[in-house]
Amino acid sequence: MSDTTTEQHAVEKGRGTLWLVWIIPLVALLMAGWLIYKHYAEKGTDIVVVFDSGKGLEVDKTPLIYQGIKIGTVTDISMDPKDLYKVRATITVDPRAAPYVTREGTKFIKVEPKISITEVSGLDTILSGVYIDLYPAGRSKKEIIAKPLKREFTGLDHYPPKRYEKGLYLTLESTKASVSLGAPVLYKSFIVGKVIDKHLENKTILYSILIDKEYENLINGGTKFWKVSGVEIQANLAGVKVKMDSLATLLAGGIAFQTPEGNVTEKPKERYTLYDSELDTHLEDDIITIVADNAYNVDPNFSGVMYKGFKVGKIVSLRYDTEKSQTIFKVKLSKKFTHLANEKSWFWIVRPILNIREVKGLDSILSGPYIAFDTLDMDAPRKNNFELHENPIPLKGKKIHLAAIHAESLKSGTAIFFKDIPIGQITKVNLVPRKKTLDIEATIFEKYVNFLNDSSMFYVKSGVEVEISLKEVHIKSGSLETLVVGGVAMVTLDKKAPRTKNSFFIYKDYKTYKEARYLKSGGAEYHVEMCELGSLSKGSPVLYKKLKAGEVVSYKYIPERDTIDVLIFIQREFKERINASTRFKNISGIEFEMNFPDMKVKMETIETIIAGGLLFETPDAKAANVQHGHRFRLYDEIRERDDTYASFELWMRETHGVKKGTRLLYKEFPVGKVAEMKLMNNMIKATVLIEKPYAHLLHSDSKLWLKEFKANLDGIKNVGNAITGPAIVITPGLANDRTASFMLDETPPPPTYGKTGLRVVLEADRRSSLDVGSPVYYRQVPIGQVESWVLSDDATRVRITVFIEPRYAHLVRERAKFYMAGAFGMDVSLMGVKVRTETLKTMISGGIGMAVPEEPGPVVENGHTFPLFNKPEEAWIGWRPKL
Amino acid sequence: MQWITDIEAGKQLCLHCRKLHPLSVHRCDRCGSEVHQRIPHSIAITWSLAIAAIIFLIPANLLPMMVVKSIAGEDAGTIMDGVIYFLEHGEAGIGIVIFAASIFVPFFKLTVLLYLLLNIHLNRSHRAKFGLKLYRIIHFIGKWSMLDIFVVALMVGLVQFKNLATIVTGPAAIAFMLAVVMTMFATEHFDPRLLFDTELKKRKHKNESNEGNTHV
Amino acid sequence: MIVKETACKECGVIVNIPKKINFSQYRCPRCNALLYRRGQPFSYIITMAVTALLLFVPLTFLPILDLDIMGLQSSSTLFEALWMVYKDGFYFIAFVAMMTGLLIPVIMLILLLFILVPLKHGYRPEKVSLYYRLYEKMSDWGMAEVYLISIIVSMVKLHGMGTLHIGLGFYMFIFFFITFYITTVWFNPDDIWLDDAVDN
C-alpha cells in the first residue's frame, strides 16, 4: 500500500512543479528572440546616400564617421536606377545615432585623401581608406528632431560650407569670383583662416570665410579685406623678382586683411566688402576723370595709377566717348594722395615703346601700360579733370635750342643723354618757316646743367648706337633702359669750356658725329668678315685686352661670299697691335644664367650687352704688318663650327616649347643647345649641338627627354623651367655604339636608366600597384627598384624589369623567389588577422620582396626571368642562406 | 532473463552514496541527501530543457560568434563561417574539431535526448540498452561543446591590438553557451533508469491485460 | 562471501556486490554500468590534490600565450582572457567559463581535501556528506580539459596572425590538469562509505 501513497503524493506535488518546468523553454524563447532582435536592431537603420562616384567605397568596410566616431557602415553599393551616372550607397546606421541621422538636411561627405596645392586633407584616409563624414541637420537634439524624417540623401564629395568648427564666420561681398574654395585667409602672409564657401547672390559674390578661433581678435569693425592673387612680379630688365604670398595663393588666390590700429573696440561685422587689392581698401570716393586720345591698351584690371613709382590709384572704368572721340578714364586715388591731383598735375601714359629709335617704359612690359602722374606744386588747388599726355612731366631746367636738318626720331619727349644718363628732354619740335633746319626746344634738367657748355655736341642716337668708353662709363644701376634708349646724345668734349651758347647743332647720326671727331684722331680702318653678325652693331666696341681699342663703324652684306663685312675703326694707339696674326673674336651677346627664383645676368663687359663687341689678340707681335683696310676673317667663328661642337638630330612630335637655343643638359649641366628646328614629314627635326667632350654620351640607347615646367593640382614640377623654358636632358645609355639621331621622350626615363647593375625580369599576372621606382627588398633591405614593365608578347603576363644595385647583384640567385610585398596585405577573417607587409613604404606604394633558399644556386645573369608570386610562402620567410 | 529492478523490489537507491533504502525513507540516513526512486519529474524537466536548448541553438547558429575588428574592416562570423574558413585554409583538423564540438555535439546530444524521451513515451523497451549506450556517450561528450566558448574567450583576451585588430565576443556566444548549459542540465536530469522501466510497464500492462482477460 | 544489496544507478536492477572488496571492478550484469571500482588510499589522493592546488597558484598570473603582431605585443593569462570577455559585457559567458574552466576544478580539489582530511582523522562520513554532495554535483561541470584543448585550438587559430609564444602558464595548466585528473581518478566516492557499509 505504501506504493499507492507514494504515487499519489508524487502526483500532487508534481502538478505545480511540472507546470513551472515549462517556464524554462519559454524563457529560452524570449531570450533567444531578444538576442536575435537585439542583433538586428543593433545593426541599425539603413539609409541610402547617392554619390557622384563610388570611388573608394567598399561594402562592409567604408565607415560613416561623425566627429571621429564610427556610427555606421556602407553595407551595399549599387547603381542609381534614376541616374546611372551616380551610385547609391546603402549605409547601415547605428541605432543610437539613427534618429539624428535620418533627418532632412543631414549632409554626407565622402572624404578621400586630397593632396593638392591648396589643400592637404583627409590624410588620415590613406591608411584607413575612404570614409563618409556626416554633418547633422542641426546642433541640438531639439533642432534635429523637429526636421522631417528622411531616408534617402545626396552625398557630397567635399565639405559643405558651414562646418562646426570653432572660429569666426564672416561674409565678404565681392564682384568677382576669383578666389577659390579652400583658399587661405592671410594675415601678414600667415594663414589664419580659409574660404569655406562662395555663392552668387543678387549679382554679388558672397564668400564665407572662417577665421580660426585663436585669430578672431585680429578682426574688428574696421578690418579691410582684399584679394591677393598669386604672383606679384616686380620686373625690370635688371632682374625679375617674383613674390608670392604663399605657394597656395599662386593657384587658388587668397584673401588678406588688415585691421587698422585704434578702434579696437568695434565689434566684428557680419559682412565686409572684399576689395580687389590692398590699394582698393583706401581709395578715395572722388572720381578723377582723365581724358585721352587713345586707350593705350590699358587694362583697368591690372593697371594702376602711379605716383613716383607708387601705385596710388586705380582705374575704375574706361570708356570711349564716341561723340568726342575721346577715351575717358575714371580714376580713384588713394586717400593719402588725392591732394596731388591738382592744377599743377600732369598725367601721362607709360607704356613700352620698343622700336629702333626708342625704348621706353620698359618696366611696363611686364606690368602693362599704366598712368603716371606728378605735380609741380603739391599745394595747388585740387582739380578733377585732367588730360592724359604721352610724355612725362617736363621738368625744370635750362632751355636750349637745337637745330636739326631732319626731325628723325626727334619729337617731344625724346630724352637727351649725357653718358647715357638722361639729362634732359625735348619739349617741342618746331618747324621754322623759311629755314632749312628745325628748331627743337629742349630742357636740360636743372641738376645736369653744369655738364652743358660751349664744347657740347649733340647727335641723334638711333637705337643701339651708343658710344661708351670703358674709362668713362660707370653704370651702377643695372637698368638697361638708359643704355638702350635712343634719343639725343650730348657729348661734352672739354669740361672747362665756357657756358655761353644756348643753341647747338644736332648731328644726324653717330657716324656723322664720329667723322667729325675722327678727323684728328689718326686711327686705322680694317674689315672683319663674319657669317653672323650676332649683336654687333654700329658703335660696338673693339676690345684689346679688355680695353676699348676701337669700334664698329659700319657693316654690310657681301652677297658673293654670303658674309658680312664689318668695318672697324682702331684708335691710333692700338694701330700697331694689328698685324697678320691678329685674331678677331665676337664676344657679343648676353649670357643669361637662369635660376629660380632669381635671374642673373652675366656679361663680358657692359657694353657688349647692348652692342656686342669684337675682341682681338695678336699672338705674334712680329708677324707681317697689314695695311689700312686689311680684311680679317672672324677667328672664333671658324673654330666654333668645326671644333667645339658635335651635332646630332633630335626628332619630336611636337615642339613642347623647344626652340632654337633650348639647352641640352647632362646632370643639370648645360652641354649643348638646339641649333635649328625644322618641320619634316609631320615630325620636327631639331639639330642639336653638343660640346665635343660630351659627345660620347650619345650611345645608341641614350634617352633624350624633355624637362619642362608642369603645374597642376597634383603638384608643381621643374619650377625653374617655368622661366627658363624647357630643357632637353640627356641620360646616357649603356650600349657601345653611337648614333646621331634620337627621338625626344616626353617623360623622364626611370631613375636607374643607364646605371650599371643587374637587371632581371619578373613575370607576373598583373602589375598590381608596382610602379617605376617601386623598391625591391631582401630582408627588408632595399636592393633595387622596378625599372620598367611591358606586357609579354602574347599579353598573358606582365614582364617587369627590375634593377638590382651592383653591390647586391650577387644576392640574386637562380632559385630566388620574388613576391609582391604588396601594399599592405592583410587577410582578415573571423579566425584571425594576418598582416604581411615588408616595410611601411611598401604599405603605401607596393614593392617586391625577394627570398633566397638555403641552396641558392648560382648568381644569375642580366635578363634572367623569374616568376613573381602574389604572396610569399610561409617557408620562404625562414630561409637564411649565407650569400 | 527477467531482471528484478528496484521498483519491483520496492526499494530506492540513494544516488549519492548508493545506499539502498526502502520506499518509506525520504532522506538518506548515511549521506543526508534526498532519496527518490526516480529523479522527480525527470521527463518533463528534460523535455523543457531540451526545448530551451533547441531554441537557443537557433540564434547561436545564426548570429556572429565573434567579431574581428581591424583596420581592414569589421568581420563578424558565425560558427559555421569559422569551420568553413579553416576547411578552406588547409587547417582541416581544426575545422573538424570545431565542427564536432560546436555543431555536431550539441545537435547530436539533443537528437539523442529527444530519441530517448520518445523511447520512454512509446515504451520501446527493446531499445533500452541501446538508449543507455547513447546516453553514456552524450553524458561524456556534453562538456566538449564548451570548447568554442573557451576559444572565443581566449581570442578576445589575446587579440587586443587597439586599432590594428581586436576581437570581440558576438551575440551568438551567449546563446550558444546557454544552449550547451541547457543540454548539460537536461542530460543531468534525465534518469536513464526510465528507459528500462518501460519494460516493467509493458510487463505490468501485459499482466493487467491478462488479468483483465481472465476477469472477462 | 558476504554480499551487500545495491541497485544499478543506470538501469535500476537490484544487484549484490561483495561486502569485502578485492581489487576488481564490479559492473552491472544488465547494462554494464560501473558499480564499484577500488580507489587509491586517501593519503595519496590528498598529496595529489595538494600538488594540483599548488600548481594552480602560478597559473593565475603566468601568461599562457604571447602574441606579437608587427611589433605589437599582447599576452594574457587564463584569467585575463576571461576578464576581457567580462569587460565586453558578456558577464554570463565570462562567469560560466571562469567557473567551469578554472574554479570548479579548484573547488573540487578543495572539497576533496575537506572530505578526505577529516575521514583520515577518523571522522564519521556523515560529517563530510555535505561536501561530498557538492563534489558530486560539480564533477560534471569541471571542464579544465576542455579549456586546455581550447588553448591549443586558439594557438592554431592565432598561428597565422603573428609570432606566437607559448607562455609558462600554458605548461603550468597542463601539469595542473594532469594532477587534477589523477586526483579525481584515484578518488572513489564509494570508499567513503565502505566502513559504514559493514554496519548495514
Image (cartoon, coloured by chain):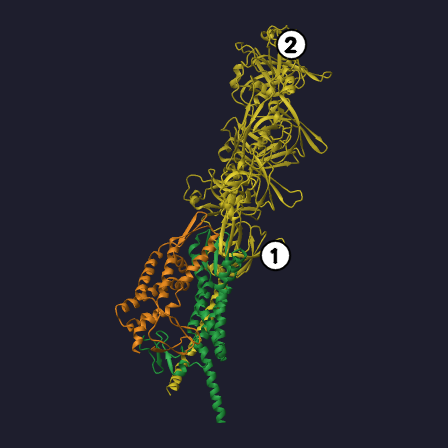
Chain colours: A yellow, B green, C orange
Residue, disc 1: A80
Q: In this rendering, does residue A661 appear at all?
A: yes
**Residue C175 horizontal side relative to residue A730, left or right:** left
Q: Report the residue that reaches farthest toward the front.
A: C1
Front position in the image: A242 or B16: B16
Q: Is residue A39 above or below residue C26?
A: above
Q: Report the residue that reaches farthest toward the bottom.
A: B216
For label 1, count other residues whose C-alpha is less than 10 Å away and answer few (under 14), some (14-19) or many (20+): some
> In the image, which is nearer the foreground, mark 2 or mark 1?
1
At numbered mark 1, what does the secondary structure look like: helix, strand or loop?
Answer: loop
Indicate the quadrant where residue A775 lies: top right
Mark 2 touches mark 1? (CB < 8 Å): no
Q: Indicate the quadrant containing the N terminus of chain A: top left, top right, bottom left or bottom right.
A: bottom left
Which residue type does callout 2 highlight?
A: Glu
At numbered mark 2, what does the secondary structure look like: helix, strand or loop?
Answer: strand
Front position in the image: A738 or A410: A738
The spot of residue A593 in percent (x, y) is: 56, 26
Residues at marks 2 and 1 on the same chain: yes
Which residue type does callout 1 highlight?
A: Asp
Q: In this rendering, does residue A402 appear at all?
A: no
Q: Is residue B67 above or below residue A641?
A: below
Indicate the quadrant where residue A533 lies: top right
The spot of residue A715 in percent (x, y) is: 55, 39
The spot of residue A108 in percent (x, y) is: 53, 54
Say whether disc 2 or disc 1 marks the residue closer to the N-terminus.
1
Residue, disc 2: A525
